[in-house]
Amino acid sequence: MTPANCPRCGGRLARDNSTGRCAPCQAAERDRLSMPPGMPDSFWDHEPVRTALARRHLGQVIRAYRHHPYHGRSPLPQSVVAGWLGITQAQLSRIENGPALVHLDRLTHWATVLRIPPRSLWFSVGPDSPVSAPTDGIRATPDLGRRTLLAGIAAVSAGAGLVGVAEQPRPRRIGSADVSRLNAVLELYRSVDYECGGGLLYREVARFAESVYRMLDWSHAPGLTPRLVAAVAAARQLAGWTALDAGRHADAQRHFAAGERAAMSADDAPLAALIRYSQAKQLQHLRHNQDALAALRLAHSELGSRATPAVRALLWGAEAASTAALGDHRSALTLLGRASDQFERVDPDREPTWMAFYDRGELLAQYGRVYRDMARQAGTHAAQAVRSVEEAIVAFGPANVRSMVLNEVGLCSALFLTDEPERAVAVGTRVVEQSRALSSSRVVDRVLNLRRDLGRHRHLPVVAEFERILTARAAATV
């Protein structure tokens, strides 16, 4: 080997140094598994990093970051950087090689974590933005970016002459394009819900849903009424879903009931089925599984021949979860088989647009939930629970943050059930931190419920400390 200089400090390396770093620099970065090191300004002027920033592709920026000579002769492993960002190595690989991210919340949060200078970013940040805030190891809250995004959605709605401003627009005659704009705004709100949770979103969506309802009194062609009423139903469903995620159960029930009536009035049986599925998810969360089964079976019976494969798979997967919770494991596995058969027949182009959230990750998550209940009650299938949840986490798209975190909670439970307490605590500690970045009461409730699966490992010091963390988290939510 030939002598060289340390890329971090410029010091001369010994001939037998194969690490690409001098000893002091190696010692200075022993904590890099927990957080990124501070980088000099010259780091961001490296050509591959500057090119990735110019392309406005954060995944490519992360890849250039990992391969920077600053880190030595070997690039930073994806697993290390994924740990900083709170995602899995497989998810980071997809982000680096997939299309550019457009979600402001994730862009601002990851720019904060990696300490990218605001001058290098392609999205605007103010002096109080999390990206501009000094980073001393404590991650700033991304709520400012989220509220900015919500304000932008409201501005889009107002600019289209619809809703989303303090004063309601003056009634006018509306046409087909207006209904299309309403549905487009709903899709924007849904994308925020997937990533941020319903706590921050509920008030905005509830106000939007009430405004859409009032539009029924505006003049419009009679032939447009079913589409407009269906838009009302979809808005109510999303308002109910965000209320459920925010822990506002009475509000959720009210919106679901109004949405169900509107969907039936519009003769939109698949949308009515989605609303009943949402009601069932609320009942499952409250552990009323018998009532959840009744809602799901009613949805099946009223769909008839109008059921699409994705809707059938969605309903059967949810029915399997309640059936397993009630102890009928054989029927639960049969229902999962039906859901899988239907999922293989899904043609996204022939499904309702609001079913876009349903993917293989959602299906695998139901497998994980059924297997966990079987492990708790019968002591079997714990290993299958771990495998199913790990596969679900990998299958979820990078924008579906809440579902990934919920399944990380499920993975923690499954690892306790397979008698892997150290690994369970490692996952659980991560999800406790991730739950703080989501405005989701459902996520918090699921995190706190982890205490029911750690019982037989409570004597271990690492588990006892984790239980103390959960107890403190519970006290902080009161």
Image (cartoon, grey):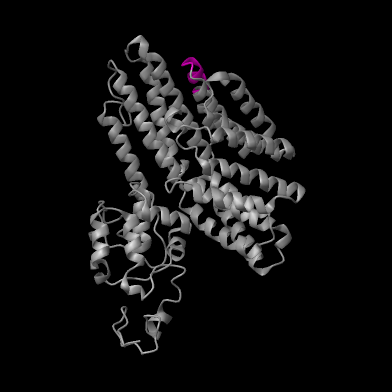
Q: Residue 368 location, x and y as percent?
A: 62, 46
In the image, is residue 182 above or below residue 328?
above
Q: Residue 31 location, x and y as percent?
A: 45, 73
- Where on the picture, by quarter, is residue 128? bottom left
Looking at the rendering, the stretch of residues picked out in magenta corresponds to: 259-267
Q: Does 392 sit left or right of 286 as displayed?
A: left
Q: Residue 153 location, x and y as percent?
A: 32, 37
Q: Residue 51 location, x and y as percent?
A: 24, 60
Q: Residue at x 24, y 71 (%)?
A: 42
Can residue 447 be seen at all in this image of the molecule? no
- Where on the picture, by quarter, is residue 82? bottom left
- Where on the picture, by quarter, is residue 69? bottom left
In the image, is residue 454 above or below residue 185?
below
Q: Residue at x 51, y 45 (%)?
A: 403
Quadrant where the N terminus is found in the figure = bottom left
Q: Residue at x 35, y 31 (%)?
A: 184
Q: Does 418 sit left or right of 214 as displayed?
A: right
Instruction: Judge whether residue 265 is colored magenta.
Output: yes
Q: Residue at x 49, y 55 (%)?
A: 434
Can residue 297 be seen at all in this image of the molecule? yes
Total marks drawn?
Answer: 0
Residue farthest toward the top in the current orientation of the protein: 222
Q: Name the main secondary structure of what is drawn in magenta.
A: helix
Name the one closer to the observer, 344 or 5.
344
Name the one closer to the observer, 268 or 442.
268
Q: Does 443 sit left or right of 335 as displayed?
A: left
Instruction: Judge whether residue 43 is colored magenta.
Output: no
